[in-house]
Image (tube, rainbow, N blue to C red):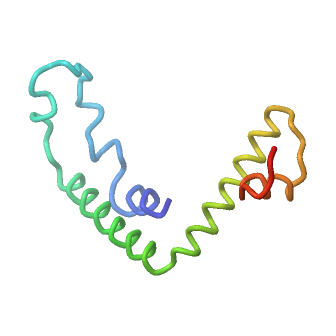
Amino acid sequence: MQLCRAISTKHLSYRNALRLDDIKMNSFEPGLIERQPITQNLLRTIRLISEYKGKQQLFKEQSPQVLETLQQAAIIKSTETSNRLEGVKAPLQRIKALVAQKTTP
């Protein structure tokens, strides 16, 4: 999320970086990709992606428990939402137990 915000607000707009208006989408045309210009904005975007990947890796190494907690919360919320969409009603504690595999369905 931070990467998208940083790239879109500070440095470039996606449309300008890749010059989407200039690209004809003839995907089978030989050499189409090779002929696309590499702009300064595109290079800056690639550099930012690399920089943020490094920060992400550092965060993974320094705070694995935070990431695991966030992942568990996302799984529980996703399960709860999926159940609701299918008309299944279950208490939050039951969903948490199922996701943690501490009980059978």
Q: Nearer the viewer, residue 26 or 14?
A: 26
Picture residue at 39% right of the left edge, 76% below the top: 58
- Residue name at image x 15 percent, y 47 percent: 38
Along the line of sight, which residue is nearer the eye, 104 or 81?
104
Is 11 in front, or is 89? Answer: 89
What x and y, as percent, mark residue 42? 23, 52
Q: Choose top left, top right, bottom left or bottom right for residue 3.
A: bottom left
Front-most of residues 72 and 32: 72
Q: Is residue 54 above or below residue 101?
A: below
Q: Is residue 18 left or right of residue 104?
A: left
Residue at position x 80%, y 48% in the image: 104
Q: Is residue 32 above or below residue 1?
A: above
Q: Quadrant of the C terminus?
A: top right
State the image coordinates of residue 92 (x, y, percent, origin top left): 85, 55
Q: Position of residue 69 (x, y in %)?
A: 64, 68
Q: Is residue 88 left or right of residue 42?
A: right
Q: Is residue 87 above or below residue 60?
A: above
In the rendered image, which quarter is residue 85 located in? top right
Compared with residue 79, is residue 10 higher up or lower down, i.e. above or below?
Answer: below
Residue found at x 72% / y 54%: 99
x, y percentage for residue 19? 26, 39
- Number of dots carrying numbers: 0
